[in-house]
Image (spheres, helix red, strand yellow):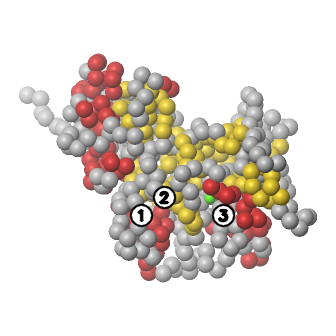
Amino acid sequence: MRGRSVRIKQANDPSLRSWVASANYADNDFPIQNLPFGIFSTAAQPAPRAGVAIGDQIVDLSILESAGLLTPSTQRVFNRPSLNDFIALGKVAWHSMREQISQLLRDDESRLRDDAALRADALVPMRRAVMHLPVKIGGYTDFYSSKEHATNVGSMFRDPSNALLPNWVHLPVGYNGRASSVVISGTDIRRPMGQVKPPDIDSPVYSPCAKLDFELETAFIVGADTALGEPVAVDRAESMIFGMVLLNDWSARDLQQWEYVPLGPFNAKTFATSISPWVVTLDALAPFRVSGPVQQPQPLPYLRHSGAHSIDITLSVELQPPADAEATTICRTNYRAMYWSMAQQLAHHTVSGCNVCVGDLMASGTISGSTPDSFGSLLELAWNGQRPLRLSDGKTQRSFLEDGDQVIMRGWCQGDGYRIGFGEVRGRVLPALRQGI
Ligand code: CA
């Protein structure tokens, strides 16, 4: 008699393999251990709906849900144009759904693999899908949590000997951004118009931005509503974070330098913010947790936590000039060195009693490392135009972005023989609409 030995594998088990062959390639962003959530549509079925990335395919969760393969099937949440209703079900539901989807996609699991009709409906090649914003974003906040970035910018714009302002080491500095202009990867970005005041003239002029930049960031998506007046404790904050995306905080440096005193960035940031389409869950990122930098001075008690609250995420930025020129990797860095954690950011955001909502987007701030090739913006990479970057063709130089340039950001956690990838966030710069001049 054959002995019955059933080994229950959790979704993060590195030995899992999928019957979707492309998911098993070592350099693929979306192995079965990842299973990020997103919103997509197809020409054949233009209504946006929820899916999970697996290899070069998307699993249509609305189909699995209708087929009764996901429980609880009484609560339909995936045939929707955003993930908000699913996210609102809470952490236990996120975890359970990810385990169920993982089970259906394993190489030894036949329910979907061997049902040709259902498989044809439920699996969509990524190349045939259009991706949409994964969540309806009520509020967008941008933090400023890389010590290296804050030091670089403070050195350039204020005083190298006093680059960090006194508050920086005591609280995660941030500002409330603009949710209406958050766009999905692939959206073209129009060079903004605005006020600039060159140092050699007395009055500002109205002109196209001449110092257009990117900022390499990650962002987290809030997974629960809180009540107005009730802060989130730092130890509870991570249970309220659904997952992470890559984010490009497009920035108009010349507008920024003139307008930011005393209330911070306004038009220099609000014209566009791009995010990657796949939300990588904190569950999928759990094996890559690391401790963040030692915080000295020790933060106030409401920001104090111990343990592994950062994540080892390798990040890169490529710049591709117009026409068919090849892309040059201009930045390689890592999320792990960020000074303030996501838990601290959320705790600080709510300490005053400010409420947050499912789908709110909270960005890390520019992620810069300590070496010149690890800076997360052109402002730093070319040091405000003083050291133009030479691209890989040996001729082209850049201090800031030019019309037609494309910026491509990527991120992944490297496992043993697989990686948990974020895919990419990309955008191309369009010429300014020179209205009024
Ligand atoms: Ca930023």
Q: Quadrant of residue 304?
A: bottom left
Judging from the image, what secondary structure is the residue with disc 2 in? Answer: loop
Q: Is mark 3 within 8 Å of ligand 1?
A: yes
* Front in this rendered view, residue 387 or 261: 261
Q: Nearer the viewer, residue 199 or 109?
A: 199
Contact check, label 2 and label 1, Cβ < 8 Å:
yes
**Amino acid type at mark 1:** Val
Badge 2 residue CB within 8 Å of ligand 1:
no
Secondary element at image label 3: loop
Instruction: List the residue tagged with mark 3.
Output: 265
Q: Are marks 3 and 2 in contact (CB under 8 Å)?
A: no
Q: Amino acid at mark 3?
A: Pro
Instruction: Give how far apart the Cα atoms at labels 1 and 3 are.
Output: 21 Å
Classify the position of the N terminus by image quarter: top left
Going from N to C along the chain, the mark reached first, 2 or 1, is 2
Residue 356's disc is 1
Residue drawn at x 30%, y 43% is 77
Residue pointed to by mark 2: 139
Identified at 74% across, 51% down, the residue is 193
Is residue 39 visible to the viewer in this orientation of the structure?
A: yes
Measured Cα–Cα span from mark 2 to mark 1: 8 Å
Q: Would you say residue 338 is visible in this rendering?
A: no
